[in-house]
Image (spheres, grey):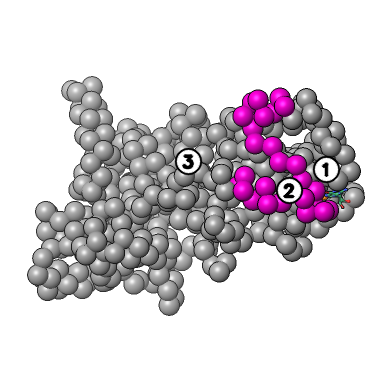
Amino acid sequence: MNTAPKGLRLHIGFFGRRNVGKSSLLNAIVRQQVSIVSDVAGTTTDPVEKPMEMLPLGPVLFIDTAGIDETGAAGALGALRVEKTRQALQRAEIAVLVAEPNDWGEFEEGLLADFAAQNTPALVVFNKTDAAPPDAALMERLRAAKLRVVLASALTGQGLPELREALLDLAPSDFIDSPAIAGDLVGPGELAVLVVPIDKEAPKGRLIQPQVQTIRDLLDSDALCMVVKERELHTALERLKTPPKLVVTDSQAFLKVAADTPSDVPLTSFSILMARFKGDLTAQVEGALAIERLRSGDRILIAEACTHHPIGEDIGRVKIPRWLAQYTGVKLEFETVQGRDFPQDPSGYALVVHCGGCMWNRRQMLSRILQCQHAGVPITNYGLTIAYSLGIFARALGPFPAALERYRALAEDAAHCCA
Ligand SMILES: Nc1nc2c(ncn2[C@@H]2O[C@H](COP(=O)(O)OP(=O)(O)OP(=O)(O)O)[C@@H](O)[C@H]2O)c(=O)[nH]1
Ligand SMILES: [Mg+2]
């Protein structure tokens, strides 16, 4: 039941001053002890995450944050706490602001402004209403501002059903009807061929998330799905009575697969499917065009969502730098970051090349794309970079007409401006 990958779960963050009962509310809603509760302000110091199945919403991830307020933010430890809570805010897809009935001020208004700035749907829970009712005028004002307000008590359980209902209402529609990975490209009864190299970088005994998620998505769409290694692709295609509707390959086998796939069969990569599913394909196509403008000495940031130990010819550390160097013919500087160690201000980089973010939720990826766009730094992803460096960008975008059109328009502009 709790095996859905973290990136597919709806992230719900609990925020608010210290000691208002965030952890108590979360424990009450999941009906078990997840976070330690105490009457000492500042009990939760690091965000605590709890995956659960919340019907009818589906898989969610509750994030209990450290209370931040004027006192809690003081000192170096306080600053760290604020930073971690801020990161939780970036990945929350719904923000629950917990407050005490008679303790509302600039701090709460500030948090609401932060949620609004991030476009994060938010609701206010007045907890501890067993002890005191909230101020009627304040309630009126919040409701007039179209904010959902729930009166609750973690102690008595009052208001918990209303809280669950409010969470369901606020769940973004793209969570409820998740965008397709490939199921919209291959109709019911049609065939997709997936090319999965089994080399020494492949994890032992299993497939990686983008491959598994693509297979599941095709099955959900009643499509047929055939999985082969790159060496068997040619034979597999020869045996088919009708050509497949789509071929999806691991980006690293792009050249061989492109050579073995007839030119009228649409071809793309898992990583490009992920760019669309997790992020913004068009934005990342625009980012890839920056490869054309790279100059000697430019710094490139390779960003990986997950932390892993590089094995063999690691894609981010070895292969992508090599392909980019070959394509551009200039000397580039590469740096790698993992997980959340992404620079707050990436403006020193000429390009950010991001992994597909398969373990992330879409909001996290979109927030990173926005962060780069605000800093004026182009961002693209692994698969797009590889396709571009190998000279098969247009072909790899074939299944996505809008992105392809954007690429053609930009490439034409660039050609005119350099002529
Ligand atoms: N009367 C009453 N007390 C509550 C309620 N919910 C929580 N408390 C008490 O409030 C205190 C703080 O609760 P926590 O859940 O630790 O609060 P928190 O917001 O997580 O606090 P930090 O982690 O320190 O930010 C505890 O003593 C709880 O027992 C409630 O609904 N009613
Ligand atoms: Mg707490």
Q: Earlier in the sequence, mark 2 or mark 1?
A: 1
| Viewer-closest of 340 and 22 | 22
Q: Confirm whether the magenta stretch covers residue 227.
A: no
Helix, strand, or loop for circle 1?
Answer: loop
Q: Amino acid at mark 3?
A: Leu
Picture residue at 28% right of the left edge, 39% below the top: 403
Q: Quadrant of the N terminus?
A: bottom right
On whether ligand 1 comes within 8 Å of the CB at mark 1, the answer is: yes
Q: Quadrant of residue 72?
A: top right
Query: Can you identify the residue that label 3 sits on?
Result: 366
Question: SS of the residue at dot 3?
Answer: helix
> What amino acid is labelled 2 in the image?
Gly
Q: Which mark is residue 159?
A: 2
Return the residue nearer the eye: 223 or 346.
Answer: 223
In the displayed structure image, the side of residue 127 where residue 269 appears, left or right:
left
Q: Alpha carbon of mark 3 to alpha carbon of mark 2: how far?
A: 33 Å
Residue 87 lies, with reference to residue 117, above or below; the image says: below
Of labels 3 and 2, earlier in sequence is 2
Residue at left offset 35%, top offset 42%: 281
Q: Can residue 265 be seen at all in this image of the molecule?
A: yes
* The image quarter in which residue 113 lies: top right
Which contiguous range is marked in magenta?
140-167
Q: Is residue 149 magenta?
A: yes
Question: Which residue is at 20% across, 29% downward?
Answer: 412
Which label was assigned to residue 129? Answer: 1
Q: Where's residue 365, x and y in %?
A: 48, 45
**Of the residues shown, which amino acid type is indicated by label 1?**
Thr
Q: Is residue 257 visible?
A: no
Dot 1 crowding, Cα within 10 Å, few <14, some 14–19, many 20+: many
